[in-house]
Amino acid sequence: METKEHVPAMLEPIGQVLRRHPKVNLQLNRALAPFENSAKVLLFSCNMCGQCLLHENGYTCLMNCPKQVRNGPCGGVRMNGHCEVKPEMECIWLKAERRSRRFPGRYLFLRIHAPLDWRRKGSSAILNAVAGWPGNGKE
Amino acid sequence: MMPADPTRGRFERALRSGRPVVTCEIGSPDGADPADVRKRAKLVRDYVDAVNVPDNTGGVVHAAPLAACAILVQEGIDPILHMTCRDRNRMALQSDLLGAALLGIRNILCLTGDHMIHGDQPETKPVYDIDSVILLEVANHLTREGKYVSGREIDPPPDLFPGCAAEPFAPPYAYRPLRLKKKVEAGARFVQTQIVFNVERFAEYMGRVHDLGVDKQVPILAGVAPIRSVKAATFMRDEVPGMEVPDALVRRMAQAGDDKKKREAEGIAICVEIFEDLRKIPGIAGFHIMPINWESAVAKISREAHLQPALGSAKTSPDEGKAAVPQEPQPQAPSAPPASVPLNS
Ligand code: SF4
């Protein structure tokens, strides 16, 4: 289950506002999402799923996986470590597994991740986390 | 609830019996003749405890495995239905899981699925809404909680027996056993591995799996396949991701020459040798034969590798299993998967 362990407790009041007022949430999202997402696209080839796991996997966007597995890697990784679908790309899970060792969030990498909530696609992952995703918007 | 059907649960019973279990795979037909499925089933039924039907392997379309499995049930065989996340979103998957239960199919091999890029219709839209780990959780959720993922009741709940695949031969080697553990935590009750050609690598993997204690939690069936020709061997080595065929094997197949009889005999000999090697590795609960459209080889392999005959999938005698299955307490019994499922919505 996704938890809010990485969200500071002092943001909880904001989370409450976001949950109670979907309209505020929407407006804020419209204002913030483009900045957050374009920064993440530039830095981490983010795919804007709105349910960010970057902090767990060494700042590697796993949604670059053509199968978009949240609990990978799939069984098709080539012997040279490249992706079964895109031979020119290193399997993103290999990269994440390697890089996650350098960051404290690694232990989260080892747990089972819930599937994507497609309603969150394109929205601001930070706001979603503060609002307490994945139940964002519904109490 | 369910009508008493001797086929139902035969696979699970075999796994609990403690003797080496044998399963095998038959291809789903490219044709609308049910006799095709029956013909393939007939070739293998006396040598195995359960029969797998793959779900459009390699991204190439065949008849729906659900239908083929339903025919196997009619034939008195306990089928293992492959279910991939490639073509169906979570709604369709739940619907198919329940549909399988309606048809008397309870063993589900949960897979992420080969990408269509390698198939004959690479322009298809991939789905991959969830992955194999989540599919395991979903299958478990339906069974244990008697509810859909949404929380809506299912009455009566299906009695599914989900399993998973293991891939020891693809990087990252160090992470693979951990991922298998994840799958077991998600509720896999049995494991079938990728085809083993590189026994050393497999032994190493099983060592790690053993250290994690996974082989005690679930029975692991090692994948074995006969090679039919050099062409098949090189194809598997070069074209099939996640499969490792040592060059020595390819050379051996090349030496066997072009004569059909000779090369097939050599292929089966290699396969039997791999069986011998696998028997020395601790933690293996049985074997999964993948003849890849060469179903007639299963009988030969079974004889030459001295596999114990199955519980008698064909003859559904009333005293089935009584003689063959010692009712001793089973330390390798599949562990109870977690009841709660971390699924949102
Ligand atoms: S090889 Fe890696 S990146 Fe490619 S589909 Fe599989 S898990 Fe995803």
Image (cartoon, coloured by chain):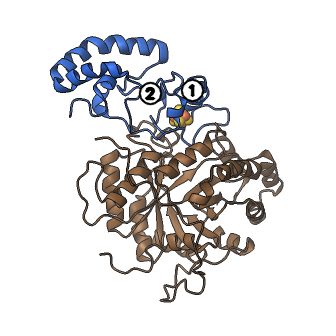
Chain colours: A blue, B brown
Measured from the top left, where is residue B214 in percent x and y? 60, 54
At 26% from the left edge and 30% from the top edge, which residue is drawn? A136
Point 37% across, 81% down: residue: B4
- Furthest toward the front, the residue is A10
| Crowd class of label 1 (few under 14; some 14 to 19; many from 20; radius 10 Å) | many
Query: Which sits in the foreground, A69 or B195?
Result: A69
Placement of B30 over or under B75, stated as above or below? above
In the picture provided, is A99 more to the left or to the right than B73? right
Q: Is B74 above or below relative to B121?
A: below
Residue tagged 1: A100
In terms of secondary structure, where does tag 1 sit?
helix
Q: Nearer the viewer, residue A117 or B236?
A: A117
**Position in image of residue A110 (x %, y %):** 53, 37
B157 sits to left or right of B195: left
Q: Going from the N terminus, do you reach mark 1 or mark 2 first?
A: 2
Q: Position of residue B55 (x, y in %)?
A: 46, 54
